[in-house]
Image: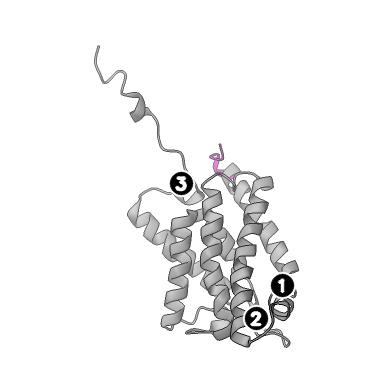
Amino acid sequence: MSNYANPPFSSQLAPRPRVLGDLLPGERVRDLLLVIAGAALVGLLAQISIRLSFTPVPLTGQTMGVLLVGTALGWRRGTAALTLYALVGLAGLPWFAGGQSGYVGANFGYILGFIAAAGACGYLAERRADRRLLSAVPAMILGEVVMYVIGVGWLALDMHWSVGYAISEGFVPFWIGDAIKCALAAGLLPSTWRLLGARD
């Protein structure tokens, strides 16, 4: 019997996509483009920025971008995308919140938090946390917690504030908005898997 009639079992199995980014064709070029696109998305959403009079931390759209990029790209590409975002912004591209660039002082901790949050969300997404709403929500919440722990901690150190005061200025005014963004991101990802017919 010809070997072509029954190819080896391993060759019949295509690798399952681990995150949404894996559904695109190609590998190295795809990954590079996804990392650049992820950084650009966060930079674009950072321009949705509202300054608040009582805190140096602005209200922005970039946190939703961080959650989506990390979860859709996986922890390696998500971390790379947010690292690229941070490095290129430090080098002078004005795509931090409100068109800023360079070292942004008290707010820089949040940018570092974005990197860690993207990695955490991507890690959980690779374990299928983004396939169902009930698992996507905790994954997004964890990303938010990681982001704020680093961001608020940096804020306290940079401004010489107590931790309690840093929480009141760097977290309390934003948690409702971020909860909404978290819910939107958590709902979008399972819906995208379902739309593409690849959730299972």
Magenta range: 195-200
The residue tagged 2 is 57
Q: Earlier in the sequence, mark 2 or mark 1?
A: 2
- On the rendered image, what quadrant is the C terminus found in? top right
Task: Kindly report which numbered mark, 2 or 3, lies closer to the viewer in this rendering.
Answer: 2
Q: Main secondary structure of the magenta part?
A: loop
Question: What is the three-letter code of the residue carrying label 1?
Answer: Phe
Q: Earlier in the sequence, mark 1 or mark 3?
A: 3
User: Left or right: 58 with respect to 30?
Assistant: right
User: Left or right: 172 with respect to 6?
Assistant: right
Which type of secondary structure does the marked residue at label 3 adopt?
helix
**Residue in view at x 42 percent, y 76 percent:** 88
Q: Residue at the far left: name it.
A: 2
Q: Earlier in the sequence, mark 2 or mark 3?
A: 3
The residue tagged 1 is 174
The residue tagged 3 is 23
Which type of secondary structure does the marked residue at label 2 adopt?
loop
Q: Position of residue 13 (x, y in %)?
A: 40, 31
Question: What is the three-letter code of the residue carrying label 3?
Answer: Leu
Could you tell me how far apart the alpha carbons at marks 2 and 3 are, in whole angstroms?
Answer: 36 Å
**Residue in view at x 60 percent, y 42 percent:** 194
Q: Residue at the far front: name it.
A: 162
> Residue 43 versus residue 70: which sits nearer the camera?
70
